[in-house]
Each structure stands twice: as structure tokens, then as C-alpha cells.
């Protein structure tokens, strides 16, 4: 449809989950060009939503170390699609248990998006998690072992975005989508 053709990949690095390829393409006018691409199985994320006794909606976030930035980042629970052929809903439910100790009774698909179109083919599937039951966490790796679990009113979480305290794209998208759905009364 676009007139561009993908001619093939040359693997330059194979990692545990991702690999890096130099991909060759042809433009509509026949020009050949290459691009470095991080090939990824994709990821999932979920906005865990509950209500306080007074009816105030709140979300569960994590504050964890992220090596690429050598910094601590506030985000919604998320994870890589690292189990072959696992449906995204199951991956999201598993990540909620692992990271924050919440088993979702209901997962509602919000959207799928491309987190970084200029460098990776990753697709992130985003869910709203409700009817949550507290269970024991099943952390994996030092980042999860040392992360903080936060329970924040949804309005405060949105304010954190507006104040520049939340930078993570999936978290910004998820929190703003959920806030809008609640405001408009379109939450399923």
C-alpha cells in the first residue's frame, strides 16, 4: 500500500529477549536503504483500578530502577511478552501478580500502541484491570525485588503526569485513558 518493500534482515545481535537487525528496504522509486531495528516480542501493561471506601478511584503504580536511564521510574505494572504464544491478557494478569500482588478478576483491553516507531517493532497491549484480589507477589529479578508499590488516587496520578513526575509513555497513555473513561462514564 505504501510502495515500500522490506527486503530482509541481517542479525547483528541476539539478546535474551530482543535482537538487533540491520534491515534492508526499497522505497517506491527503487532506492534501497537500511535501518537498525530492535526486534521485540512486544509487551503488556495494565492500569490496576480500585476504589476507596468513599468511592475515590485509585491506581497501583510501581517505582522501580530502570537500567537504560540509571534512574528510578514510576510506572504502571508491565512486562515483556517473554512466554511464547501466551495471550496478552494472560501476560498482563501474570505481570500484575508478579509486580504488585494483584490478581485481576476482569481485564478490559484499552489499546495497542507502538512505543518507539523509529527504533523497534514492539507493540504494547494496554489493559484496564478491575475486580482485583490481593495475592502474594512473585517478583523476578533485582529491579522487581527492590521496587516500591504505590497506591495513588487517580486524580493525583494524572497530576503527577502534568507536573512532569511520570515520564513513562505507557503509564501516561494508560492513566489518561482510564481517567477519561471514568470522567465520560464509558468504563465498561
Image (cartoon, grey):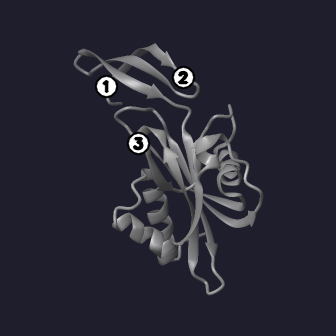
Provide the residue designation for mark 2: 15
With 88 as the anchor, is 4 left or right in this view?
left
With 82 as the anchor, is 2 left or right in this view?
left
Spatial CA span between label 1 and label 2: 32 Å
With 31 as the anchor, is 34 left or right in this view?
right
Residue displayed at 39% across by 64% down: 161
Seen in the picture, residue 144 relative to 14 is either above or below; the reply is below
Which quarter of the rendering shows the N terminus? Answer: top left
Q: Quick one: SS at disc 1?
A: loop
Q: Are marks 1 and 3 in contact (CB under 8 Å)?
A: no
Q: Quadrant of residue 173?
A: bottom left
Give the mark nearer the N terminus: 1 vs 2: 1
Provide the residue designation for mark 1: 3
Marking on residue 49: none
Seen in the picture, residue 11 relative to 80 is either above or below; the reply is above
With 32 as the anchor, is 51 left or right in this view?
right
Relative image position of residue 68 (x, y in whole percent): 43, 38
Question: Between 71 and 106, which is closer to the camera in this rendering?
Answer: 71
- Crowd tier of the residue under label 3, counting other residues whose Cα lies within 10 Å: few below 14, some 14–19, many 20 or above: few
> Farthest residue toward the bottom?
54
Question: Which numbered mark, 1 or 2, is in the foreground of this view?
Answer: 2
Which quarter of the rendering shows the C terminus? Answer: bottom right
Provide the residue designation for mark 3: 69
Give the mark nearer the N terminus: 1 vs 3: 1
Amino acid at each position: 500500500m505504501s510502495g515500500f518493500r522490506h527486503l530482509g534482515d541481517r542479525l547483528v545481535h541476539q539478546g535474551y529477549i530482543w535482537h538487533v537487525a540491520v534491515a534492508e528496504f526499497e522505497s517506491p522509486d527503487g532506492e534501497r536503504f537500511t535501518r537498525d531495528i530492535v526486534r521485540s516480542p512486544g509487551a503488556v501493561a495494565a492500569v490496576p483500578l480500585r476504589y476507596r471506601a468513599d468511592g475515590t478511584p485509585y491506581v497501583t503504580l510501581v517505582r522501580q530502577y530502570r537500567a537504560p536511564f540509571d534512574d528510578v521510574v514510576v510506572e504502571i505494572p508491565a512486562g515483556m511478552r517473554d512466554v511464547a504464544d501466551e495471550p496478552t491478557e494472560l501476560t498482563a494478569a501474570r505481570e500484575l501478580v508478579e509486580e504488585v500482588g494483584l490478581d485481576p478478576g476482569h481485564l478490559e483491553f484499552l489499546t495497542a500502541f507502538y512505543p518507539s516507531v523509529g527504533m523497534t517493532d514492539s507493540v504494547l497491549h494496554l489493559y484496564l484491570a478491575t475486580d482485583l484480589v490481593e495475592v502474594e507477589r512473585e517478583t523476578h529479578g533485582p529491579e522487581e525485588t527492590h521496587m516500591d508499590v504505590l497506591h495513588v488516587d487517580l486524580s493525583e496520578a494524572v497530576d503527577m503526569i502534568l507536573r512532569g513526575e511520570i515520564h513513562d509513555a505507557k503509564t501516561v497513555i494508560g492513566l489518561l485513558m482510564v481517567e477519561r473513561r471514568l470522567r465520560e462514564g464509558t468504563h465498561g
